[in-house]
């Protein structure tokens, strides 16, 4: 250190100058300019950043749009066929049991589509945190798959024509994870926005890892 008045070199931590007697209180407390500056990116007590939820979602019934459209076409077509087959001069004219056959068959595809959409809505759940992505499958018995964001290699979105009309689709995650190299998020509402959110979290996670390694 140096005297803050006359500039003579003094032993480190000196309170007064040996030559001019000036007080060195402020200088003694000042850090050495040559000392290395410690990084501020290291978490307190060496602990990793806290994992926080970023997004939660599930299967959207909109993803069954094609099935609902097909079921509607089937329903209308069945009743058109009924009126054509039971008209005057036809073999089915006056047979009351025919209407029950058509009444039973016409709603079956629609009921099936509703059942599948409801089941997937109850059994498919997704959660994105600042560190991991989770897929939970099941209602009573459950299976949970997860992948570390740092292991994600690629994120893509796929949408059919009907899915684009309803703004739903599938997000595919490819990773270097040995257990789950490919993860599919089915029936997502606004899949492109979710893909971008996931991509942003992957990049942020990689930055944090790099910063921690540099400290």
Image (cartoon, rainbow, N blue to C red):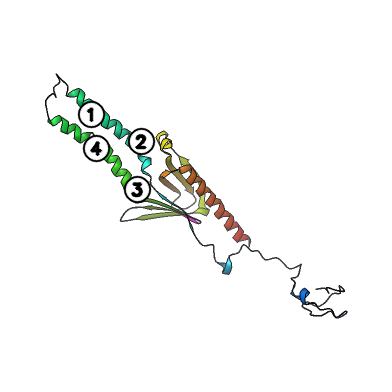
Label 4 crowd (10 A; few <14 / some 14-19 / many >=20): some
Query: For the residues marked 2 and 1, what is the alpha-carbon distance in whole angstroms?
Result: 20 Å
The answer to whether the residue labelled 4 contacts the one labelled 2, judged by CB atoms less than 8 Å apart, is no
Q: What segment carries the magenta color?
A: 129-133
Residue 147 picture location, percent across and down:
46, 54
Local SS, label 4? helix
Q: Is residue 31 left or right of residue 188?
A: right
Query: For the residues marked 1 and 4, what is the alpha-carbon distance in whole angstroms?
Result: 13 Å
User: Which numbered mark, 1 or 4, is in the foreground of this view?
Assistant: 1
Rendered position, 123 above or below 47: above
Upstream in sequence: badge 1 or badge 4:
1
Upstream in sequence: badge 4 or badge 3:
4
Upstream in sequence: badge 4 or badge 2:
2
Rendered position, 4 above or below 122: below
User: Which numbered mark, 2 or 1, is in the foreground of this view?
Assistant: 1
Residue 175 picture location, percent across and down:
49, 49
Label 1 crowd (10 A; few <14 / some 14-19 / many >=20): some
Q: Which residue sits furthest top?
A: 89
Residue 148 picture location, percent across and down:
49, 55
| Quadrant where the image shows the C terminus | bottom right
Local SS, label 2? helix
Which residue position is annotated with label 3? 121
Query: For the residues marked 4 and 3, what is the alpha-carbon distance in whole angstroms?
Result: 20 Å
Which residue position is annotated with label 2? 66
**Nearer to us in this view, 15 or 147:** 15
Which residue position is annotated with label 4? 108
The answer to whether the residue labelled 2 contacts the one labelled 1, judged by CB atoms less than 8 Å apart, is no
Upstream in sequence: badge 1 or badge 3:
1
Residue 44 picture location, percent across and down:
58, 67
Upstream in sequence: badge 2 or badge 3:
2
Local SS, label 1? helix
Q: Residue at x 19, y 34 (%)?
A: 103
């Amino acid at each position: 250190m140096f005297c803050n008045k006359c500039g003579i070199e003094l032993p480190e931590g000196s309170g007064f100058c040996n030559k001019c007697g000036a007080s060195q209180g402020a200088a003694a407390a000042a850090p050495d300019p040559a000392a290395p500056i410690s990084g501020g990116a290291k978490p307190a007590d060496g602990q990793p950043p806290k994992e926080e939820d970023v997004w939660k979602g599930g299967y959207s019934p909109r993803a069954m749009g094609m099935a609902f459209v097909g079921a509607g076409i089937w329903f209308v077509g069945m009743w058109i066929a009924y009126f054509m087959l039971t008209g005057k001069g036809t073999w089915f004219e006056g047979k009351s049991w025919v209407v029950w056959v058509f009444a039973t068959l016409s709603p079956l595809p629609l009921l099936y589509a509703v059942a599948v959409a409801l089941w997937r809505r109850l059994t498919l759940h997704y959660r994105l945190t600042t560190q991991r992505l989770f897929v939970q499958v099941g209602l009573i018995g459950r299976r949970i798959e997860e992948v570390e964001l740092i292991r994600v290699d690629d994120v893509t979105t796929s949408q059919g024509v009907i899915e684009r009309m309803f703004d739903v689709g599938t997000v595919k995650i490819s990773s270097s994870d040995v257990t789950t190299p490919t993860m599919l998020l089915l029936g997502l509402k606004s899949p492109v926005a979710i893909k971008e959110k996931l991509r942003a979290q992957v990049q942020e996670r990689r930055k944090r890892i790099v910063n921690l390694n540099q400290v």
